[in-house]
Image (cartoon, rainbow, N blue to C red):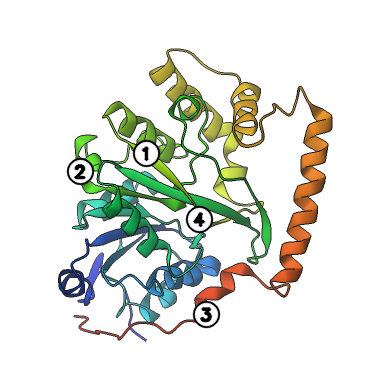
Amino acid sequence: MLAIESSTIKAETRTVAMAASHDCPLVTIVTPSFNQGQYLEKTILSVLRQDYPGIEYIVVDSMSTDETPGILARYAGYISRIIRDKDRGQSHALNKGFAMSSGQVMAWLNSDDCYASPRVVSDAVAYLKENPGVDLVYGRRKYIDATGFFELDYPYREFCQTTLMMTDYIPQECCFWRREIFDRAGAYIDENFDFAMDYELWLRFLASGACFASVNSFFGLFRYYQEQKSRSQWTNKGLPEVERLHERYLGRKLEEQVFFGLFMDYYYGFERSRHPSSEQIRVNLSGLVGQLRQVAKGIAPIDGWVHHRDLPGRTDNRR
């Protein structure tokens, strides 16, 4: 097994040549990683098993001490660039990855999430090619548990800028944007944010004149579990960061129950605290739909699709 000890390791891949030969834009995907080895392999495979030919995949690992080094070694011949070095947090890791990228389309996928199917990148690029006025496109998210089983999803809704200014409903792992808007907005992830850096980026894109669009296709699988950052750090990090963003872009703070209510109103047409009976009906229906979907899928983890496709031809020029 290849030992990965240096701060940067390059694996020469086919991506740039393939992108040129297929007349399609290169897509950069960055995965920041730290001690999430139990999920990382599926994250990596969900990228490597995309059917889009021109992907530049960069993994930035903050010297994980779990099984991550072995997983990265296993797939080093497929990953465009692996960076193993200490960083100042997730936002810094993303900046290191994007600074080394060359894709015309950009995205990031956290090390516990997955793409929902092998067609995600192809569908996103096709939409951007067909809609040259759109700067960022995003699809829908399915929430999954730690073992990959379906938890819930929200109904499809079109993009609403007014709502986004007040509550972040955009699923980060489902987003693809043009390099032009990233450059226009400063070409960075704000390292002052360790939780809501995606929300900060969307609002900065909007302030830079970006056009957003949603599509009614599932792009991402968002792993939702007790130790996950989105749950464990919401009170001490997430909420204060969202409040800072509201003050910056709205000129005032919004109460937590207000922007959560706006989130529910966006998806369901009612604010759950004012309409508890409607909320209970929604919960009951959501549970029933979830059970039916599990039965229809053979009661299997939905992130298991990553094991059912071959990897592309390996170009192993590691140095």
CA separation, marks 2 and 4? 24 Å
Pointer 4 residue: 217
Q: How far apart are marks 4 and 3 (CA)?
A: 21 Å
Q: Which residue is drawn at 82% across and 46% down?
A: 284
Is 307 situated above or below 133? below
Q: What residue type is labelled 1?
A: Phe
State the image coordinates of residue 151 (x, y, percent, origin top left): 69, 56
Residue at mark 2: 180
Residue ID for mark 3: 307
Three-letter amino acid code at the position of disc 3: His
- Residue 30 place in picture, x, y as percent: 34, 58
The mark that comes first in sequence, 1 or 4, is: 1
Residue at horizontal 55 percent and vertical 47 percent from the top: 229
The CA span between labels 1 and 4 is 15 Å
Give whichever of discs 4 and 3 has the lower sequence position.
4
Is there a contact, CB below 8 Å, between mark 1 and mark 4?
no
